């Protein structure tokens, strides 16, 4: 079964975004940054977080079938 990563992006203003991905975390963060620069509305992080001054933190790995339940938990 495929494993996914539940992650938190936290910026210098202590704003946080919880998400999930099956990609490497740095690749996912790069996508968030790219989407913000392109003004894409793929997720709430694009408008709120300071993605130039942030870190991405792995919270947990889980099976794909548990992905959204665990993401909502965080």
Image (spheres, grey):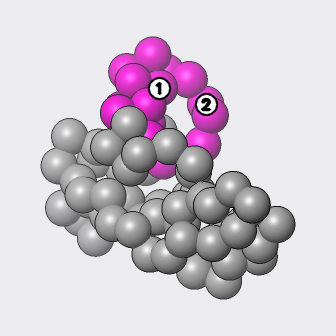
Label 1 neighbour load within 10 Å: few <14, some 14-19, many 20+:
some
Provide the residue span drawn in magenta.
28-45
Distance CA(mark 1)–CA(mark 2):
7 Å
The residue singled out by tag 1 in the image is 35
Q: Is residue 30 magenta?
A: yes
* 20 with respect to 46 (left or right): right
Q: Is residue 2 visible?
A: yes
* 17 with respect to 10 (left or right): right
63 or 59, which lies in front?
A: 63
Q: Is residue 69 magenta?
A: no
Q: Is residue 16 visible?
A: no
Q: Position of residue 48 (x, y in %)?
A: 43, 49
Q: Position of residue 28 (x, y in %)?
A: 44, 41
Q: Residue at x 56, y 23 (%)?
A: 40
Per the image, label 1 sits on a secondary structure element best described as helix
- Above or below, 66 against 37 in this view is below
- Above or below, 7 against 26 in this view is below
- Above or below, 28 against 55 in this view is above
Q: Are marks 1 and 2 in contact (CB under 8 Å)?
A: no
| Quadrant of image for the C terminus | bottom right
41 or 58, which lies in front?
A: 58
Per the image, label 2 sits on a secondary structure element best described as loop
């Amino acid at each position: 079964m495929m494993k996914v990563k539940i992650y938190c992006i936290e910026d210098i203003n202590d704003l946080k975004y919880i998400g999930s991905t099956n990609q490497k975390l740095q690749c996912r963060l790069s996508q968030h940054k790219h989407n913000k620069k392109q003004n894409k509305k793929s997720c709430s992080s694009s408008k709120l977080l300071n993605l130039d001054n942030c870190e991405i933190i792995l919270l947990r790995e889980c099976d794909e079938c548990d992905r959204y339940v665990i993401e909502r938990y965080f």
